[in-house]
Amino acid sequence: MAISVRLGEEVEKRLATLAKITGRTKTYYIKEAVLEKLEDLEDLYIAQKRVENPGKVWTMSEVEQDVGLDG
């Protein structure tokens, strides 16, 4: 899927320089940046939903009993 993105001149220069000195394409770095940020945003969304709807909460003794550390 093709997507068009406008980058500021400074960002484009930095991206071009990085691509040139590493021998990789600008597209490679754009994909990497999007994937990394997307993972961060997905994690944030999941965390926010868990805060809003925490579900079951276990006590320490319940956890210890569940994993066999209760004695």
Image (spheres, rainbow, N blue to C red):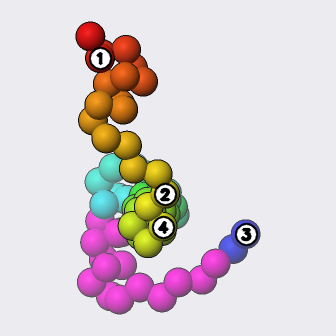
> Residue 20: x and y, percent?
35, 58
Distance CA(mark 1)–CA(mark 4) = 29 Å
> Of callouts 1 and 2, which one flags the residue occurring earlier in the amino acid sequence?
2
Distance CA(mark 3)–CA(mark 4) = 35 Å
Mark on residue 1?
3
C-beta proximity under 8 Å, tags 3 and 4: no
Q: Which of 3 and 67 is in front in this view?
A: 67
- Tag in front: 2 or 3: 2
> Residue 33: x and y, percent?
42, 63
Quadrant in which the C terminus is drawn: top left
- In this rendering, is residue 10 above or below 2? below
- Tag in front: 1 or 4: 1
Read off the magenta span.
Answer: 3-17
> Residue 69: x and y, percent?
30, 16
* Label 1: few (<14), some (14–19) or many (≥20) C-alpha neighbours in 10 Å: few
39 displayed left or right of 65: right
Distance CA(mark 2)–CA(mark 3) = 38 Å
Distance CA(mark 2)–CA(mark 4) = 6 Å
- In this rendering, is residue 36 above or below 49? above
Residue beneath disc 1 = 70
> Of callouts 2 and 3, which one flags the residue occurring earlier in the amino acid sequence?
3
- Tag in front: 3 or 4: 4
Judging from the image, what secondary structure is the residue with disc 4 in? loop
Residue beneath disc 4 = 53
* Label 3: few (<14), some (14–19) or many (≥20) C-alpha neighbours in 10 Å: few
C-beta proximity under 8 Å, tags 2 and 4: yes
Dominant secondary structure (helix, strand or loop) of the stretch shown in magenta = helix
Q: Give the residue type that dot 1 points to.
A: Asp
C-beta proximity under 8 Å, tags 1 and 4: no
21 displayed left or right of 35: left
Residue beneath disc 2 = 55
Q: Give the residue type that dot 3 points to.
A: Met
